[in-house]
Amino acid sequence: MEPFENLVDTLKKFPSLGPKSARRVAFYLLRQDNNELERIGSLISNLRKGLVTCSQCGNISSKDPCHICTDPLRDRNILCVVEDVESLSVFEQAGIYNGLYHVIGEKIFDGLSDKSSDSLAKHIIQLKPDEVIIATSPRLEGDISYYTIIDVIKGLGVKNITRLAYGLPLGGSIEFADRMTLHTALEGRRKV
Ligand SMILES: [Zn+2]
C-alpha cells in the first residue's frame, strides 16, 4: 500500500483536503481504470506546459495577449485591478463582470514592487479606461495595497477610480466570496 499512502500524503497538502477527504479522493482514484488515471495524470503533468503570462494583464492563458484581453465583446473602458489570477478566476466564474483585468501578481503587504507599479501604469496608459476598479481583498492592517495602487493610478488621467463596496468580510479574501456577495460588492462600488 505504499504508493497509495504516498498519494494520500500528497493529497493532504491540497487546499481544503484534510486527511479524511484526501483518503476518499485516493480511493476514488483507485476505482478508476488505467486510461482515466493516465488522463488525470497527464492533465496534472502538462498543467504548466503551453501556459504563458499575458503581457498586458498578467492573466495566465494559452496565448499572449490572453483570451480576455483579445475578446472584442469585453468592455475596454473598465479595468478591474486584482491581486492574483485566483481572484480574476473568481470574478470570471461568477459571470458578473465584462470589463478587462489587471493582475498585480503578488500578494501586497508593503506596497507594490517597481515592476508591478510599472506594469499597472503601462497597462492604464495604453488602455485609457474610463474607470479603474480596485478589487484587492480588504485587509485589517492599514490596507497598504489599496493606497499603493491608488498612488500608481492617480495622475494617469483616469476619470473614475472606484473600489468594491465591502460586503466582503474584512480580512477575508476575494477567493472565498460567493457570487452574490461579489455581485453586491461590484454593483455598490464607490468612487474614491
Ligand atoms: Zn490579458
Image (cartoon, rainbow, N blue to C red):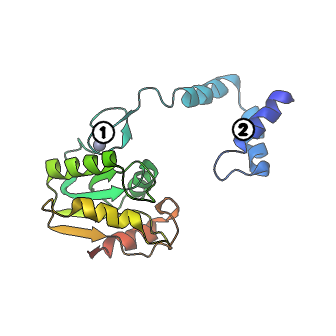
Q: Which residue is mark 1?
A: 66
Q: Report which quarter residue 96 is drawn in.
A: bottom left
Residue at 40%, 55% (x, y): give it: 83
Residue 126 numbered tag:
none
Which residue occupies the foreground of this view, 132 or 122? 122
Q: Position of residue 155 (x, y in %)?
A: 15, 62
Q: Is 33 positioned to the left or the right of 170 in the image?
A: right
Residue at 43%, 59% (x, y): give it: 110
Q: CA distance from mark 2 to mark 1?
A: 32 Å
Q: Is 190 positioned to the left or the right of 158 in the image?
A: right
Which residue occupies the foreground of this view, 73 or 46? 46
Q: Quadrant of the C terminus?
A: bottom left
Q: Position of residue 55 (x, y in %)?
A: 28, 38
Residue 31 appearing in the image: no
115 over 139 or under it: above or below: above
Which residue occupies the foreground of this view, 52 or 42? 52
Q: Position of residue 147 (x, y in %)?
A: 33, 67
Dot 1 surroundings within 10 Å: few (below 14), some, or many (20 or more)? Answer: some
37 over 12 or under it: above or below: above
Q: Position of residue 92 (x, y in %)?
A: 38, 53
Q: Is 176 positioned to the left or the right of 50 in the image?
A: right
Ligand 1: quadrant of the figure: top left
Residue at 23%, 44% (x, y): give it: 71
Q: Amino acid under label 1?
A: Cys
Residue at 36%, 54% (x, y): give it: 112
Q: Which residue is mark 2?
A: 10
User: SS class of the residue under badge 2?
Assistant: helix
Queried on whether the Cβ of the residue with tag 1 lies below 8 angstroms from ligand 1, the answer reads yes
Q: Amino acid under label 2?
A: Thr
Residue lying at the far right in this picture: please name it: 1
Q: Quadrant of the N terminus?
A: top right
